[in-house]
Each structure stands twice: as C-alpha cells, then as structure tokens.
C-alpha cells in the first residue's frame, strides 16, 4: 500500500514568521487541470501593512550589512536551493503541469540567478558610482545606496523563476521587500520563503503575501512607508492607477516589462532601487 | 620581566594533515619534480616541516603545456557563470578549511596565528568570493563589450603573505578566463600545496591551475617561457626590474607589485591614540614583512617627542614569540637570509648616526627573531630612510609644514602606499592629492579588501590588484588586443626567442 502523504499548509511570510492571514481568509489553489492543491492564505490589507512594518524594521540591519556579507547571504540561498531542487521541481510540475525537464530548467535558472545577483552585491557600487572630476579643489564621490522598502508584484505566470527574478535584484543593494506572489502559482514562493528562513537572510528582509494582487496592490502603492514599487507582474491589473497612487509619495516605479514568466537579469534592476549620494569635501584647506 | 605574564595559548596543530613530501601540482595531480628537493622549515624553530620538490625548466614547461591545454580545451570554452561557480566552490572550501590553512601559514611563514587566522585566510576566501562574482560580468569591467582572456598566466609570488598573494593572483586570472602556472616562494610553499588539495576537492578541471615550487630559477623559467602570455609578479623591486627586462620586446603582458618605503604622516591635530595604534600596525604587522608597510614615520615636530615616547610605551607591551600562540603580536622573521638583511641595515642605521631603540624582551633561542626597533634622528639621506628593510624597523623623521611632509614623503623612488593622520578632512584630502603613491590610508593603515585596487607608482611597480581594476590585468579589450598583435609581430618573435 502506498503511504498516505502529509500535505503542507501554505501560509504567509512576514517578519521571518509564517502567519496565516489575519483575516482568516484562504483561497483554493489548483493544478493546471483544476484539481485541488492547497488552500493558500488570502492576504488582507492588514497583512500587507504588517509586511511593510516588518520590512521597514529589517531595513537597518540588511542595508547596514557589508556588501561582502550581503553577497554571501544571497549566495547561501543558492546553496540551500540547490539542496532542495527536487522539492521545487515536484511543486512546479504539480502546479504548472509542465514536464520534469521544464520544471528542472526553471529551478536551475532560479538558482543561477541568485548566484549572478549575489556577485553584484560588492561590485555594482564600483561600476555605477565613482569620483567626479569637478572643477575646483574638491573631493567629489558618488555612491549608490538602497532606496528602502520595495513593494513588488511578482510575474504571474511562473512559480519560482518570476519571483526570484524580481526579488533578488531588489535585495542586492540592501533594500527590503514586500512581494505579492503569483495569484495562480503562489505555493513555490512560500516554499522559497521557508528556504530563506533557514538561510542567513534576516527575518523581515523578504515578506511574501499570497492572494489577490488587485486587492493588495493599491494599499502598497499608496502606503507612505513604501519607497518603491516594482510592477513587473501587474500587467493584467490597472497598473496605471497604481502608478498614479505611487506618485502621491513619489515612489520609484518600475512599470510592467512584459515578462509574464520572469524579467531578464540586468544591472538596471539593481540600480532602479538605489539612490545616488554625492559627497563633496573641500581640499582647499591644507 | 615582561609587561604581563600569560600562560601560553598555543593553537593546536592537530588540524593539520601534512604529508612528509610534496611534489609539483601539474595537470590536476601531484607529480615529482626533476630539479631536486628542498626543505621548508618553520622559521620559529628552524625545524623541517616537509620536503618540497624543486621544479626544473622541464617541469615548468610541463606545467605551461598543461595550462595551455586546459586553456584551449576547457577553460576558455567554459561560460563565465561556470568559471564563477568553480571560484565560489574554492572560496567556500577555503572558508571550510580556514583554521587548517591559518595554522599551516603561521607554521611555515612565522607570522602570528592571530594574523593568519583573522587577516590572511579570511581575505583569501573574500578574494575568491569577490572574483567569482566577476566571472560572468566581464562586460561591466570597464573594458568595453566582450573583453578577452589573455591565455596562460605565469605568476610568481612572495613569502610574506603566501596564500593571500596566491589568491590575489589566481582569483582574477581564473575569473577572467586565463589558466595559471604559479610559483610560491621557496620558503613558504606549504599553503599553496594545501590549496592544490582544495582545487582537487573543488574538481577544478585539470591544468587550469598548476603550482610549481622552487627558487628563483623556477620563477625565471616561468617568466621566460615563450608560451606564457601574461606575467604577474609580487616581490622585490630588483627582481621586478629583471623581469621587465626579460620580457621586453615580447608580447607578454606584465604587472608588478614591488617594494615600498611608505611614509606615515602624523599631523599635530591627529587623533593620537588611534595614530599610535596605526603606526604600530603599519610597521610591526607581519613583522614588517609588508611591501606597503609604514616604514617611514613623519611626525610634525611639535608632537615628535610625545609620539615617540608613547610609541616606546606601546612597543613594550608587544608580545614576541611563538607564532602559533594566540597572544603573540610579533612572530618570527621568515628566513635567516632576511634576518641578516634586517640586521645589516639596522647596523648601518646606527653607524650613520640614527638613534636605535628596542623594547626589553626575551627572544626564543632557536629560530629567526628581531626585536621591534625604532630609529630616531633619522635624516632623509640615511639608508634606513631610503631602502626597504622589510622587517620590524621604523625610521622616525620630523617635519614642520604640510609642504615639507609632502616633499619628504615623495622623496623616494618607491610609491606604493602612504598614511595620513589628522582630524582635518580637508588636510587629509589635500595631502592625499599630492602624494605619489597608489594607496593612501587616512586615519587607518594596512587595510585590504578585494573590492579595493592595490598597487604602486614609480618603482613600486605597475598594474592594480583588487576591484574592477584588478580584472584589467588579466583581460584585453577586443579592439586593443587585435591592434597589439598586428602592430608588433617582429617584437613578438624577438621576445619568443629569449
């Protein structure tokens, strides 16, 4: 007789903990053929606001860590994911109804993406910053710094890769994030949050909400303690309205890029959520 | 009676798994050399640690052939991401075997375990981790799109930071897509050979890194070898000069990190407590065996006596002795030869009229030891103010005005590093502007980071190691490389004959 399996309860990930939605709501997640997979948490406005508080609280530690340290922590995620490839491959095959080869390719690409972005942590500053040859006896140096709390809507047509493709770059510079996962394919992002919780990523750096993007996004777009908004997965939403809401507090906004599955790896996604600080210091007084 | 009595706190050597004999690491495995053997000894006891193979010219040729084959067949065809993955593996393995490497380094080199454990080996891991991330980002290195690797890099490194210098050389070379033949110094081959085991654990493809041990002749064979595309050397200015002459007229690329005679300038508004610590760290770190050591202290005249008195007080608290003792501040001089050189120059310092001072402390009976030494009343013409001692010997000079400090600091054929101590930001930046040195430390000294370029002006060498700039030493931008090859075919031939 085959063994009876033990299904997992998928919850939210806020501040390093895994609470159910404070609203008590869940929604049914099904596989590609419509069969029941799990009851995911249907996060509320209050959950989103809690996630922002957690992200803000984690910002000082994460942005204050050395670039080398952040790089190692991001690389550690890749190491742990490598050990859990089978779990994610299974999950993706079930949720997306794809072949093992396709699911494996998605997992491998996601792992390699963590490695690629990990390497940027102690390099992007030297590539995009630098000394400015101003006219006069001044030391003048421009350095990028993290923007702060970033809210992201993950690409909706992928379980893992889309999520990683927007979250990893936002973390590189030292931002903390609140992510709205794919509505239809939310389970792997919660499993990833479980990986993050057992890696060296401090609690609150990555907060994951599952549920309805159209319900939660306006609250995050208008939240005064969110500094930037990545609309990567908001194509199907009224994202222009979200951009208008974000304008009220002059959030930095990345518009939907057309990547429903994932967004391409690029240095731009790191620098999008940085602020350039230029320091002038006189050299005139010997 | 020393300052404070502590019970010995020796680091255990049980973490080591040394072999009695080591061969050369060529094409992924240890093989016997044909140039005879030599002993590597512990400079703190003069006892032999292991028997090491000396690589003959034929052995070096085998290593270069292996490196070329690995370059052509494997390494140059690998994606940057995959090269990076190997380097990440190496970084992690170094972290995992960090204590073992630190103990081996202190045993073989004589440096205090607190330095090998807290400085050398963590930086080794950091260097590999940093350059691992570059391997798939070469387009961002500032050399334009699609920069190319150079081929086989021949690397010769010194004995003062044996494994760290290996990391400085190997990590960027591999990240950029080159393969390597490297020779560790003859007095400190041990950690390079343990590193070879790490390469095996990382399953680095055979021949990508070849480690040939031996003395000067082995290094010269690497430099001369016609199939080496790039030479990187860290060591003395005298040898660097010879290398530059040897490869003149060839199409080999060269980076040199050579000697120094750094000025450490202390202004009267300096934070004195920090400055004293910085001066001590600047010259007595690693027994002064540091190319960028702050060996010339320039003190503003009105605080000269106070600084010297406090330095002497501080020196009396330094603990000199067993490198493996966790409380040791100053370890053993690396070799009898180096000890003789330090003694000779110090004696000359006295003869030339400088005032010599060392703290009261007992030195172990066996091994190579030299007390931390301060010379005052030094003038700029003294040999101890001009020549690199490469030992725990500080020459103190004074100055009155910033202009005089700058003139004295720049009065040297070297130009590797300099220190500035002042509470006034503008003064620091203005002085830094005028110093002819590759690395300037302000209110700190001897800081190293893989993200920060390091290298000298003038006779301290050329090229930079570390940071984006360090990649440039191992890459050619697509355009420039082509023009070099077509512009100088004759010169290339001439070089190949040498």
Image (tube, rainbow, N blue to C red):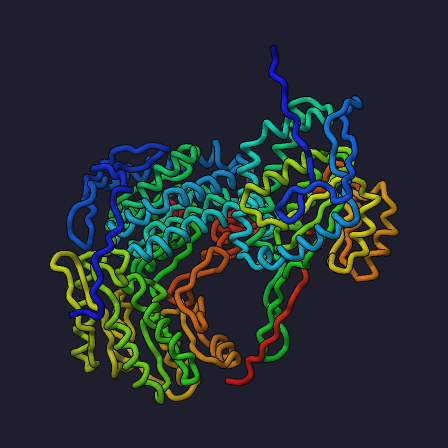
Q: Tell me what residue is drawn at x 23 percent, y 39 percent.
A: B53
Tell me the quarter of the picture where residue B68 sits: top left
Q: Tell me what residue is drawn at x 41 percent, y 53 percent.
A: B123
What quarter of the picture does the N terminus of chain B occupy? Answer: bottom left
Q: Who is closer to the viewer here, A58 or B343?
A: A58
Q: Is residue B183 left or right of residue B21?
A: right
Q: Who is closer to the viewer here, B237 or B455?
A: B455
State the image coordinates of residue A51 (x, y, percent, origin top left). Answer: 70, 50
Q: Tell me what residue is drawn at x 70 percent, y 42 percent.
A: A264
Q: Is residue A186 above or below residue A151?
A: above
Q: Is residue A264 above or below residue B273?
A: above
Please say whether residue A82 is visible from this viewpoint: yes
Tell me the quarter of the picture where residue B81 sits: top right
Total marks shown come to: 0
Q: Who is closer to the viewer here, A133 or B43?
A: B43
State the image coordinates of residue A103 (x, y, percent, origin top left). Answer: 66, 27
Report the residue that reaches farthest toward the left.
B365
State the image coordinates of residue B390 (x, y, percent, origin top left). Answer: 27, 65
Q: Is residue B269 above or below residue B358?
A: below
Q: Tell me what residue is drawn at x 84 percent, y 54 percent.
A: A243
Q: Is residue B179 left or right of residue A114?
A: left
Q: Is residue A242 left or right of residue B55?
A: right
Please say whether residue B216 is visible from this viewpoint: no
State the image coordinates of residue A239 (x, y, percent, origin top left). Answer: 85, 48
Report the residue that reaches farthest toward the top.
A1
């Amino acid at each position: 007789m085959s063994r009876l399996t033990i299904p997992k309860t998928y919850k939210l990930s806020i501040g390093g903990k895994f609470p159910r939605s404070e609203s008590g709501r869940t929604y049914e997640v099904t596989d590609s053929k419509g069969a029941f997979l799990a009851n995911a948490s249907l996060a509320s406005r209050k959950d989103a606001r809690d996630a922002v508080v957690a992200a803000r609280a984690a910002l000082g530690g994460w942005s204050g860590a050395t670039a080398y340290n952040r790089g190692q922590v991001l690389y550690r995620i890749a190491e742990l994911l490598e050990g859990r490839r089978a779990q994610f491959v299974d999950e993706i095959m079930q949720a997306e109804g794809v072949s093992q080869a396709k699911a494996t390719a998605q997992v491998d690409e996601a792992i390699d993406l963590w490695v690629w972005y990990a390497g940027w942590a102690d390099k992007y500053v030297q590539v995009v910053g630098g000394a400015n040859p101003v006219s006069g006896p001044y030391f003048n140096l421009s350095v990028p710094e993290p923007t702060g709390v970033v809210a992201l809507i993950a690409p909706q047509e992928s379980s893992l890769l889309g999520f990683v493709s927007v979250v990893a770059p936002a973390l590189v510079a030292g931002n903390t994030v609140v992510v709205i996962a794919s509505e239809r394919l939310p389970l792997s992002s919660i499993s990833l949050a479980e990986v993050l919780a057992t890696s060296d990523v401090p609690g609150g750096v990555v907060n994951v909400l599952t549920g309805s993007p159209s319900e939660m996004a306006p609250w995050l777009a208008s939240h005064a303690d969110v500094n930037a908004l990545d609309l990567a997965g908001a194509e199907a939403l009224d994202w222009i309205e979200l951009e208008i809401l974000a304008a009220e507090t002059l959030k930095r906004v990345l518009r939907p890029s057309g990547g429903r599955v994932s967004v391409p790896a690029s240095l731009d996604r790191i620098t999008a959520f940085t602020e350039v600080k230029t320091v002038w210091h006189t050299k005139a007084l010997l | 009676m020393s300052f404070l009595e502590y019970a010995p706190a020796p680091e255990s050597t049980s973490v080591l798994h040394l072999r009695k004999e080591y061969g050369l690491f060529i094409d992924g495995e240890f093989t016997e050399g044909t140039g005879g053997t030599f002993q590597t000894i512990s400079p703190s006891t003069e006892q032999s640690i292991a028997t090491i193979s000396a690589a003959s010219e034929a052995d070096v040729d085998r290593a270069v052939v292996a490196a070329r084959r690995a370059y052509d067949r494997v390494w140059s065809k690998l994606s940057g991401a995959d090269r990076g993955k190997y380097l990440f593996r190496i970084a992690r393995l170094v972290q995992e075997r960090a204590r073992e490497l630190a103990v081996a380094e202190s045993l073989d080199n004589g440096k205090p375990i607190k330095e090998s454990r807290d400085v050398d080996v963590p930086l080794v891991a950091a260097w590999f981790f940093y350059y691992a991330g570059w391997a798939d980002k070469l387009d961002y290195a500032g050399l334009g799109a699609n920069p190319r690797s150079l081929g086989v890099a021949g690397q010769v490194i010194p004995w003062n930071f044996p494994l760290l210098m290996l990391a400085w050389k190997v990590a960027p070379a591999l990240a950029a897509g080159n393969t390597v033949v490297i020779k560790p110094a003859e007095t400190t081959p041990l950690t390079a050979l343990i590193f070879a085991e790490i390469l095996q654990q990382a399953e680095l493809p055979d021949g990508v890194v070849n480690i040939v041990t031996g003395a000067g002749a082995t290094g010269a064979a690497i430099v001369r070898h016609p199939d080496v595309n790039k030479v990187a050397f860290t060591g003395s200015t005298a040898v660097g000069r010879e290398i530059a002459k040897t490869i003149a007229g060839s199409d080999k690329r060269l980076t040199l990190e050579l000697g120094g005679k750094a000025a450490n300038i202390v202004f009267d508004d300096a934070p004195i407590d920090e400055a004293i610590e910085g001066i001590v760290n600047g010259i007595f770190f690693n027994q002064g065996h540091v190319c960028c050591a702050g060996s010339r202290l320039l003190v503003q005249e009105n605080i000269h006596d106070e600084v010297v008195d406090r330095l002497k007080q501080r020196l009396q608290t330094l603990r000199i002795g067993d490198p493996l003792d966790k409380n040791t501040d100053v370890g053993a001089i690396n070799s009898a030869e180096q000890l003789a050189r330090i003694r000779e120059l110090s004696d000359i310092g006295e003869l030339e009229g400088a005032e010599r001072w060392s703290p009261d402390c007992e030195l172990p009976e066996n091994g190579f030891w030299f007390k931390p030494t301060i010379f005052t009343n030094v003038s700029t013409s003294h040999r101890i103010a001009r020549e690199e001692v490469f030992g725990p010997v500080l020459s103190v000079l004074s100055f009155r005005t910033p202009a005089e400090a700058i003139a004295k600091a720049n009065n040297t054929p070297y130009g590797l590093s300099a220190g500035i101590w002042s509470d006034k930001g503008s003064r620091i930046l203005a002085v830094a502007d005028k110093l002819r040195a590759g690395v300037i430390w302000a209110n700190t000294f001897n800081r190293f980071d893989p993200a920060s370029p390091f290298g000298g002006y003038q006779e301290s060498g050329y090229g930079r190691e570390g940071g984006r700039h360090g990649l440039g030493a191992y890459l050619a931008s697509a355009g420039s490389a082509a023009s070099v090859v077509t512009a100088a075919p004759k010169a290339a031939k001439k070089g190949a004959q040498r």
